[in-house]
Amino acid sequence: MNNHSYNINCNCLDCYLTRHEKVADDGEDGEDGCFINYSDLVEKTKHGGLVSNSASYDKHRELNLHMNDAKIRQFDTGGVRDSDEEKFDIEGFLNPLVLNRYFEYMHKHRNLPNGKKRDSDNWQSFFGVNHNDVCIKSLLRHVQDLWLHHRGYSKVTKEIIEDSICAIIFNANAYLLKILTDKKNEIN
């Protein structure tokens, strides 16, 4: 690992890592794959306190340089993650209760009138050359039922309000998938 002799007072990255590995080898920390505390490594590297003299450590040095340029999150535990500011917050965008109800709806509608069960992804094969027409007509029928529920006319609807909403989501998904697929095919 080192290009020079290990020195307890040396401020290079290799000697820093060797000091921590030596502690692990002495059984004080890190034995048998347990945690080795590198919590100050990023901070020292970020402020130029450590320098690398080892070619074998270039990729780690490169990573640390990238982390210095990018926004990072450093945790009290020493863990480091890149920023999540520009990443999708999927956990916030979706709700598991809503998704679960939609999955129940989709599963129920896998059953065909002839007693067979269609594949769960059957809809992703599209509904013929007029796919979007099929989707928009169905979507609007379910919107009509939702609207009737909303206005207090539930007795004249064809389905319960939750199924109306799930059907709207389904048809919107199918419509959007066709748009995205066509767009992808145009690019290719």
Image (spheres, rainbow, N blue to C red):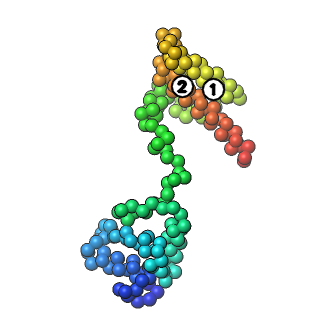
Residue 20: x, y in percent?
A: 34, 76
> On the rendered structure, is 143 left or right of 91?
right
At a point 44% along the width and 89% down the height, the residue shown is 4
Q: Give the residue pinned by disc 1.
A: 135
Q: Earlier in the sequence, mark 2 or mark 1?
A: 1
User: Which residue is pictured at 44% across the width and 82% down the height?
Assistant: 12
Q: Is residue 107 visible?
A: no
Amino acid identity at mark 1? Cys
Residue 101: x and y in percent read: 44, 29
How many numbered callouts? Answer: 2
The answer to whether residue 37 is above or below residue 1 is above
Please indicate, yes or no, whether residue 53 appears anywhere in the rendered image.
Answer: yes
Q: Position of residue 143 (x, y in %)?
A: 57, 21
Secondary structure of the residue carrying numbered label 1: helix
Q: Are marks 2 and 1 in contact (CB under 8 Å)?
A: no
- Residue at 71 percent of width and 29 percent of height: 129
Q: CA distance from mark 2 to mark 1?
A: 10 Å
Which residue is the site of mark 2?
Answer: 167
Q: Is residue 114 left or right of residue 33?
A: right
Residue 90 x/y as whole percent: 49, 44
Q: Nearer the viewer, residue 16 or 104?
A: 16
